[in-house]
Amino acid sequence: MIRFLPLLALALAGCGEGARGPVEAAGPTIVSLNPCTDAILAEVAAPGQLLAISHYSEDPSSSSMTPQDAARYRATGGTVEEVLALDPDVVVASTFLAPATRAALEDLGLRVVTFGGTATVEDSFAQVRELAALAGYPAAGERLVEEIETALAEAEGQGDPVEAALWQPGGIVPGEASLVSDLLRRTGFSSYSAARGMAQADYLSLEQVVADPPQVLFVAGSESGQRHPVLAEVEGMRQESFDTRLLYCGGPTILRAVRFVHSVRERVS
């Protein structure tokens, strides 16, 4: 029997392989079903610990990861069968995970941990720390938080705020209780929509933009009005394309978002 133990150990190691090679972590193996947690876990987990990410992260139009980073991992469609085949210790998902899916995973003995969205930078820091602790590497979470804090300090707005409107997909504006609004405030912008009494998901028309333009118009949608050539002719308004992948997730996504809006703020100044 003893002579078979090395073969058994090798087989078990093979079962635990992630996209980055054999598991080297002391913490639990993880499958992530949420594009926001995908990106954070890729930063704070040990090599081989993150067994798979969500299929959303494979799509450049929805991913919070670079294509190069996403390509390092397996991806799943989030089905119970796919997750079970990977045999993780923990499944990390959105709070929108279907109750039936969660119940099935837990009935099969898997631990399921869900995370909601983040409305502020502080919310995102808490999420980073919670995911890093879950992975067993809290120090990695602190390093990511410190990197974001440094980027925010470097991008802190100087002088009078620049009025900006963020025109999201569907022609709507974000509410003030949203992560992207918090980032814009921290980097020296004031909210065009809040100043006009607009709330979360209120519709901003092309006619309003033309008649009452902001100093900066961040366009994150592709509606016909958001692509109208008249926008280029609005006097005193700078138009900038805003990558939709920077709108919703925290963690490392904040770094890219802050660097982008800071560069715009400097050009306007």
Image: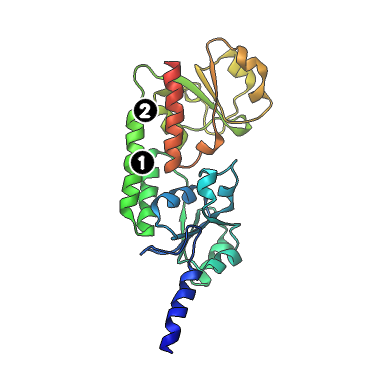
Picture quarter with the C terminus = top left
Find residue 199 and report its horizontal and vertical position in percent: 52, 30
Up the image or down, 202 lies above or below 47; here it is above
Q: Are marks 2 and 1 in contact (CB under 8 Å)?
A: no
The label shown at residue 135 is: none
- In terms of depth relative to the viewer, which is nearer, 124 or 24? 24
- Would residue 10 be found to the left or right of residue 149 on screen? right
> In the image, what residue type sits under mark 2?
Ala
Residue at 32 percent of width and 46 percent of height: 143
- In terms of depth relative to the viewer, which is nearer, 22 or 83? 22
Find residue 65 and report its horizontal and vertical position in percent: 51, 44
Distance, label 2 to label 1, CA atoms, is 17 Å
Find residue 214 and report its horizontal and vertical position in percent: 51, 17
- Residue 217 location, quadrant: top right
**Do we see residue 18 in this rendering?**
yes
- Would residue 72 be found to the left or right of residue 151 on screen? right
Q: Nearer the viewer, mark 2 or mark 1?
A: 2
- Residue 152 location, quadrant: top left
**Do we see residue 247 in this rendering?**
no
Identify the residue under disc 2: 155
Picture quarter with the N terminus = bottom left
> In the image, what residue type sits under mark 1?
Glu
Secondary structure category for the residue under label 2: helix
- In terms of depth relative to the viewer, which is nearer, 65 or 187? 65
Residue at 40 percent of width and 55 percent of height: 45
Identify the residue under disc 1: 122
Find residue 93 and report its horizontal and vertical position in percent: 50, 56
- Would residue 46 be found to the left or right of residue 240 on screen? left
Crowding near pointer 1: few (<14 within 10 Å), some, many (20+)? some
Residue at 40 percent of width and 28 percent of height: 185
> Is tag 2's residue or tag 1's residue first in the polypeptide sequence?
1
Q: How many marks are shown on the rendered structure?
A: 2
